[in-house]
Image (cartoon, rainbow, N blue to C red):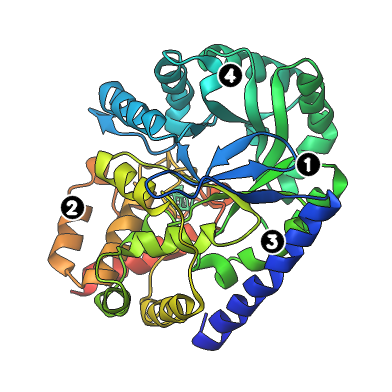
Amino acid sequence: MDRRDFLKCTLTLAALAPLARLTAQTGAAAAGADAGTESGKLTRRRFRDTDLTLPLLGFGMMRLPQKNGAIDSAAGQKLVDYAMKAGLNYFDTAWPYHGGRSELFVGEALSRYPRESYLLADKLPVRSIKSLQDAERIFQEQLRKCRTGYFDFYLLHALNRGNWETVKRCGLYDFVRRMQKEGKIRYVGFSFHDSPDVLKTIAEAHPWDFVQLQINYLDWHNYRSREQYEIVTKLGIPVIVMEPLRGGTLATLTSEATKILKTSAPDASPADWAFRYVASLPNVICVLSGMNRMDHLKENLRVYSPLHPLSDSERLTLASALAAYQKVDSVPCTACNYCVPCPVEVAIPRVFGAYNQYKIDGNFAAFKKAIDALPNEGGPASCVSCGVCLKKCPQKIDIPTQMKRIAAELKKK
Ligand code: SF4
Ligand code: SF4
């Protein structure tokens, strides 16, 4: 996105603010006004026209702290305890996170709190479902793993054109609404990875309670997040944001981009800017962050305690930083891990992570060292272009082509 495009999107945001207010008044409401804007207090947003409020920062359970290849429960529990104490009581897990162990951890960590004190979101893994019986079995298993009798928010996971066909064929929308009637789900939504036209079809098909979208300032145009946001906002569906930092990418910018931001606000990190950007959208009700370090959790809480929406001049500053950052030729990987395991054990997200870091800091020796240290010769040269990973990547990255390109770059030097 160039500076002109970014300015255009700034104007779009301004145009959407009155729209959100209007829809709230007419009852097609999405996110309500901020509740709690006192200094030091985490901002909360009202959910539709209910009495329920969500913390602006939600805890994504897909990147928990790890030790010896497993979730480090003690470290994770400390994060959960700190979050709960700070008023961050929205936790988002899913069937495939951490190979199925995220839900178990969530059950263990939250069972020490009264059930009504936290909000739990889980997702039906549509991609793994072949029949309604599969959905029923998995749903019961999720309740058991999470040690709960109900989910506050329940999503059909990672909908796209293909998964939407599965939803229709297996009757999964009716299934989740039935679970809602039985008191096992409070609110029904879906998470999404595809083009705006597919989103429009799905969003208009049913009266969804909420939706989870990938939004950040890099994807606003690149991933067509702006169009997606506009579609659901017009329908009055509130948005939960995933990937506000694009898998951590926006936490570390190039030196030129960082300098622009630091000149404007010396104490703010690039992550602060990214978090404020998405939360400044009026129809956003909660922003998920996968936090595995205490300093990140504290930092993110600080940004939203309370939220100070971006001013017009700050948006211009961010536009300049983005233009500087986009000179870098990186791979748009969010490190979601959906593409692994690879049959020949290429460590796909780690290769892209090391490559992107190299593109930012220019440290080839560190890049090469990181690739050489990958277990089981998991570097880009091991890729046999089998294509197994291609269907799994929600960002639609041409992984084998990128692997070839990175392997060639490693060889050149
Ligand atoms: S295309 Fe390459 S990276 Fe992808 S699954 Fe096949 S071998 Fe692994
Ligand atoms: S390559 Fe795609 S699927 Fe794999 S971790 Fe990156 S974004 Fe996720």
- Please tell me which of labels 3 and 2 falls first in the chain: 3
CB of residue at label 1: within 8 Å of ligand 2? no
Q: CA distance from mark 2 to mark 1?
A: 47 Å
Label 4–label 3 contact, CB within 8 A: no
Look at the picture and state if 132 lies above or below 234.
Answer: above
User: In the displayed structure, does residue 165 sit left or right of residue 300?
Assistant: right
Task: Specify the amino acid type for callout 4.
Answer: Gln
Q: CA distance from mark 4 to mark 3?
A: 29 Å
Q: Which residue is mark 2?
A: 372
- At numbered mark 3, what does the secondary structure look like: helix, strand or loop? helix
Label 3 Cα crowd, 10 Å radius (few <14 / some 14-19 / many 20+)? many
- At numbered mark 4, what does the secondary structure look like: helix, strand or loop? helix
Q: CA distance from mark 2 to mark 4?
A: 38 Å
User: In the displayed structure, does residue 145 sit left or right of residue 138?
Assistant: left
Res. 270 visible in picture: yes
User: In the displayed structure, does residue 143 sit left or right of residue 356?
Assistant: right
Residue 412 figure quarter: bottom left
Q: Residue at x 25, y 44 (%)?
A: 295
Task: Specify the amino acid type for callout 2.
Answer: Asp
Residue 283 figure quarter: bottom right
Label 2–label 1 contact, CB within 8 A: no
Label 4 Cα crowd, 10 Å radius (few <14 / some 14-19 / many 20+)? many
Q: Which residue is mark 4?
A: 142
Front of the two marks 2 and 4: 4
